Image (spheres, grey):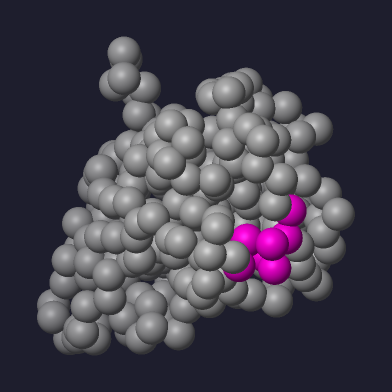
């Protein structure tokens, strides 16, 4: 269905994140280096989005944070004999929270040139793709079919989903919402024909909302690298450490195991993950 070369063609971000002006480095401001602070306080602060399943999400009944990005961070924290502290943020505020030293790490952030001006990125955790969820009866399967004035597409405003639709479907009627969940509601209500989202988010939505039509990866397939973001520092010790952790986990299959475990925990079978995604 898809291949790695296709998924690499776009290099678009998972979500749009506000970009502040470049700030002074940690050493210039006198701030303690992130890795030193984690070792000293025995606390790793992860930025997480409450409604971002399966990346991160908060269980409404127990208050527990879950998701494969939470599991990634827990494993990293354990290396320091540290506790994981979740700091709630949004896709749009993650860069600002890194710059303000509110969080040490945000997983699920894709590199863009603008973001790279002010934050650092680790190596790719895995490759994802843009997918489409649809109301039942809507049959569009490729970008050319979506690029039509008769088609209404839901996106979360300012996100990479918004960016790809704006670029590829200028003739479509685009409904922009503050959150992914609002877009899903529009599709469920029939106000939108489809919604463009990250494939992992899409798999979760279809599983939770059986009244939706089948998931499709519009052709040609476009996608993004899923990475982690860090506050810019003169010393790259923290970033380098996380890169070593990623390489190690990839070599032993840990990244794939944690992703699939969390997909299955919310009822999404690994067999439904489209072919060509590099886990």
Q: Residue at x 54, y 45 (%)?
A: 193
Q: Is residue 268 visible?
A: yes
Answer left or right for 186 relative to 133: left
Please provide the residue range marked out in magenta.
141-147
Question: Vertically, is 261 above or below 253?
Answer: above
Which quadrant holds residue 231?
bottom left
Q: Is residue 56 visible?
A: no
Relative image position of residue 174 (x, y in whole percent): 43, 60
Task: Give the residue at the far front of this rendering.
Answer: 150
Which quadrant holds residue 263?
top right
Question: Vertically, is 141 above or below 24?
Answer: above
Relative image position of residue 175 (x, y in whole percent): 39, 55
Question: Vertically, is 126 above or below 236?
Answer: above
Answer left or right for 233 relative to 153: left
Task: Give the residue at the far left of this rendering.
Answer: 30
Question: Vertically, is 174 above or below 190?
Answer: below
Q: Residue at x 70, y 76 (%)?
A: 9
The front one of 191 and 111 is: 191
Answer left or right for 46 relative to 1: left
Q: Residue at x 47, y 45 (%)?
A: 192
Q: Is residue 98 one of those drawn in magenta?
A: no
Q: Residue at x 53, y 72 (%)?
A: 171
Which quadrant holds residue 96?
bottom left
Relative image position of residue 184 (x, y in whole percent): 45, 38
Q: Quadrant of the N terminus?
A: bottom right
The front one of 239 and 103 is: 103
Answer left or right for 224 relative to 189: right
Q: Is residue 145 one of those drawn in magenta?
A: yes
């Amino acid at each position: 269905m898809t291949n790695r070369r296709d998924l690499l063609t776009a290099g678009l971000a998972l979500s749009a994140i506000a970009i502040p002006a470049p700030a002074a480095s940690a050493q210039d401001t006198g701030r303690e280096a992130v890795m030193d602070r984690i070792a000293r306080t025995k606390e790793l602060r992860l930025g997480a989005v409450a409604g971002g399943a399966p990346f991160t999400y908060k269980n409404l009944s127990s208050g527990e944070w879950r998701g494969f990005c939470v599991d990634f961070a827990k494993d990293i924290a354990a290396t320091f004999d540290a506790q994981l502290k979740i700091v709630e943020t949004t896709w749009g505020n993650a860069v600002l929270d890194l710059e303000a030293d509110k969080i040490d790490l945000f997983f699920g952030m894709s590199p863009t040139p603008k973001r790279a001006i002010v934050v650092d990125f680790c190596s790719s955790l895995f490759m994802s793709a843009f997918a489409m969820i649809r109301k039942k009866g809507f049959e569009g399967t490729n970008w050319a079919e979506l690029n039509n004035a008769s088609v209404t597409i839901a996106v979360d405003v300012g996100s990479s989903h918004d960016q790809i639709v704006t670029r590829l479907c200028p003739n479509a009627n685009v409904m922009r919402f503050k959150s992914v969940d609002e877009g899903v509601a529009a599709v469920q209500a029939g106000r939108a024909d489809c919604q463009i989202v990250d494939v992992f988010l899409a798999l979760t939505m279809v599983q939770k909302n059986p009244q939706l039509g089948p998931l499709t990866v519009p052709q040609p397939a476009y996608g993004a690298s899923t990475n982690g973001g860090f506050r810019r520092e003169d010393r790259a010790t923290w970033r380098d450490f996380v890169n070593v952790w990623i390489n190690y986990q990839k070599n032993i299959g840990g990244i794939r195991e944690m992703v699939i475990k969390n997909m299955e925990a919310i009822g999404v079978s690994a067999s439904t993950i489209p072919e060509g995604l590099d886990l």
